[in-house]
């Protein structure tokens, strides 16, 4: 059966041109000589270990696996992807011959597999996010097996579009996830979204307790996530990796899982980040629609109309980025009778994924957008004024609804109960002068006793009402005490709206 493989063209893309021009997938490891006479994986490991005596066992095993795939497991007809970093593109080809060692080639260019290229200019943005995450491993050589990779890569080569994963590829249980992540024979780390990870732990948002529980259990299995699941938008993709193994031979990914207990003071540098960052917005991690600087202005405007965009990124051959918008097009059309894309393109601010969101609000408001740059240096998203509006709505809606719940409860409780009864339900009776000083927890305490609840004369089931109030109180505590941009879940929003519907029905006064 056909397999699919990724072969990176060097840490900085230094092997890209040779790979495309000469028709090869090229591996590095210049210190190793001809590997064509190696008969077993054990022999290969021994050679790697003797050549790199200062490397850890995990690194030796890692490099041995990559070289064994490249020299022995690639089959004629297998698909190969080589990322072209300089253009943010992908080259797709088929293996057309056995491993070769080119003794006369420059160091780092000797280990090759002949490849017949099918396509060398596929925009990386054409690949859907789930498959893009599979391409994100830092290994030089690795197999692509998940999310229907083989058929999708072939479709990309032939048609330039990604048909998506027909099976969804979802991990269905926490045990399944942990088993896959700790399987030493697995070639790929399990990948899933932060939202999916939380769901496997029965959670919808990254509260302090949820984060501590997940980190504790991952640590017990010797695992962590890359990047940390505590950072970024909730639908961003992460992978589970061993904390003691280096997926990238040059980089150690170790992150100590922290726990939070009532009787232990957690050092400040171990607490979750409190800065609201650009990368916390969903739009900062969505693929950016773009055009090439060589495209026509008509091509750019057509793409903007087709996607209902107000602006597009414009990349040139050097990787530099500008932008074109309806405003810049209008100004260029006034200044030039037949304006070109270059004349309509304007400088654009590019901000880091970790940059403060609040520090960039004025720029986004005044200009309309900023581009977002990830840790690897590539453009990962675009944040617009509309995204800020949507984020505000997502954060403000549950807060506003809960505020209405509190106002409606206060009005009725003040009408029915005496000040002494109200103070008896409060944690701070001496500072309580009306129901306006009660928390949702205090209302819950006051109304959980049936005789007091029935004094409200609301034709609502007592147990269901109090249960819903308890749920909303917990949601309100999450919103008030935890620094997170995670939206409330659909179930949480339904609980809030359900309580609002009850209160509006029994007391329709505005």
Image (tube, rainbow, N blue to C red):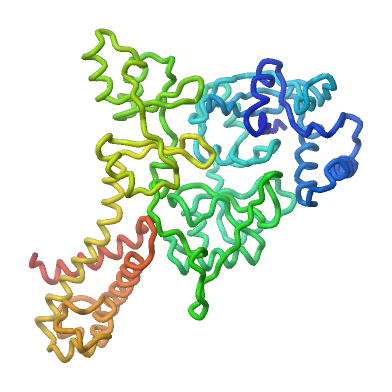
Check the image and report above or below for 432 versus 277.
Answer: below
Instruction: Please name the residue shown 51% across and 63% down the image.
Output: 269
Of residues 5 and 503, which is closer to you in this image? 5
Instruction: Please name the residue shown 46% across and 21% down the image.
Output: 316
* Quadrant location, the C terminus: bottom left
The quarter of the displayed image where residue 40 is located: top right
Left or right: where 104 falls relative to 147: right
Instruction: Please name the residue shown 78% across and 26% down the image.
Output: 107
Left or right: where 481 falls relative to 424: right
* Quadrant location, the N terminus: top right
Check the image and report above or below for 479 versus 427.
Answer: above
Which x, y percent locates residue 365? Answer: 26, 40
Which x, y percent locates residue 396? Answer: 26, 56
Instruction: Please name the residue shown 64% across and 41% down the image.
Output: 138
Check the image and report above or below for 255 versus 283.
Answer: below
Left or right: where 509 falls relative to 107: left
């Amino acid at each position: 059966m056909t397999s699919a493989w990724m072969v990176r063209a060097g840490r900085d893309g230094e092997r890209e041109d040779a790979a495309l021009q000469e028709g090869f997938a090229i591996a590095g490891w210049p210190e190793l000589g001809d590997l064509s006479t190696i008969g077993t994986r054990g022999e290969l490991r021994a050679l790697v270990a003797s050549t790199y005596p200062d490397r850890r066992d995990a690194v030796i095993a890692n490099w041995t696996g990559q070289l064994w795939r490249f020299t022995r497991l690639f089959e004629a007809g297998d698909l190969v992807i080589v990322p072209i970093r300089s253009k943010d593109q992908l080259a797709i080809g088929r293996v057309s011959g056995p491993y070769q060692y080119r003794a006369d080639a420059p160091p780092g260019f000797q280990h090759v597999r002949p490849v017949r290229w099918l396509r060398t200019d596929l925009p990386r943005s054409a690949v859907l996010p789930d498959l893009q995450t599979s391409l994100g491993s830092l290994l030089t050589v690795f197999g692509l097996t998940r999310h229907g990779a083989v058929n999708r890569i072939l479709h990309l080569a032939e048609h330039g579009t990604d048909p998506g994963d027909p099976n969804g590829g979802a991990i269905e249980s926490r045990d399944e996830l942990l088993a896959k992540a700790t399987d030493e024979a697995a070639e790929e780390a399990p990948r899933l979204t932060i939202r999916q990870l939380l769901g496997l732990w029965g959670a919808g948002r990254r509260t302090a307790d949820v984060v501590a529980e997940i980190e504790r259990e991952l640590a017990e299995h010797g695992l962590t996530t890359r990047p940390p699941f505590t950072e970024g938008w909730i639908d961003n993709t992460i992978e589970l990796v061993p904390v003691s193994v280096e997926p990238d031979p040059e980089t150690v990914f170790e992150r100590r899982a922290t726990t939070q207990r009532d009787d232990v003071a957690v050092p400040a540098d171990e607490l979750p980040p409190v800065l609201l960052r650009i990368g916390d917005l969903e739009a900062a991690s969505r693929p950016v629609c773009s055009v090439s600087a060589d495209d026509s202005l008509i091509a750019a405007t057509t793409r903007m109309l087709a996607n209902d965009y107000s602006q597009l990124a414009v990349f040139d051959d050097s990787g530099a980025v500008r932008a074109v918008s309806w405003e810049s097009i209008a100004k260029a059309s006034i200044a030039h009778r037949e304006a070109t894309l270059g004349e309509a393109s304007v400088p654009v601010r590019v901000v880091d994924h970790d940059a403060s969101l609040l520090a960039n609000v004025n720029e986004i408001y005044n200009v309309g957008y900023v581009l977002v740059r990830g840790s690897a240096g590539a453009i990962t998203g675009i944040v617009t004024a509309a995204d800020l509006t949507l984020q505000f709505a997502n954060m403000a809606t549950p807060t506003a609804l809960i505020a209405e719940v509190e106002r409606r409860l206060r009005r009725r409780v003040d009408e029915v109960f005496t000040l002494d009864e109200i103070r008896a339900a409060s944690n701070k009776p001496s500072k309580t002068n009306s129901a306006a000083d009660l928390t949702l927890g205090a209302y819950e305490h006051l109304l959980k006793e049936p005789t007091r609840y029935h004094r409200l004369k609301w034709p609502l089931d007592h147990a269901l009402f109090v249960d819903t109030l308890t749920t909303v109180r917990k949601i309100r505590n999450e919103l008030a005490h935890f620094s997170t941009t995670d939206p409330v879940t659909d179930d949480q929003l339904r609980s809030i709206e359900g309580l609002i519907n009850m209160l509006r029905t029994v007391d329709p006064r505005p």
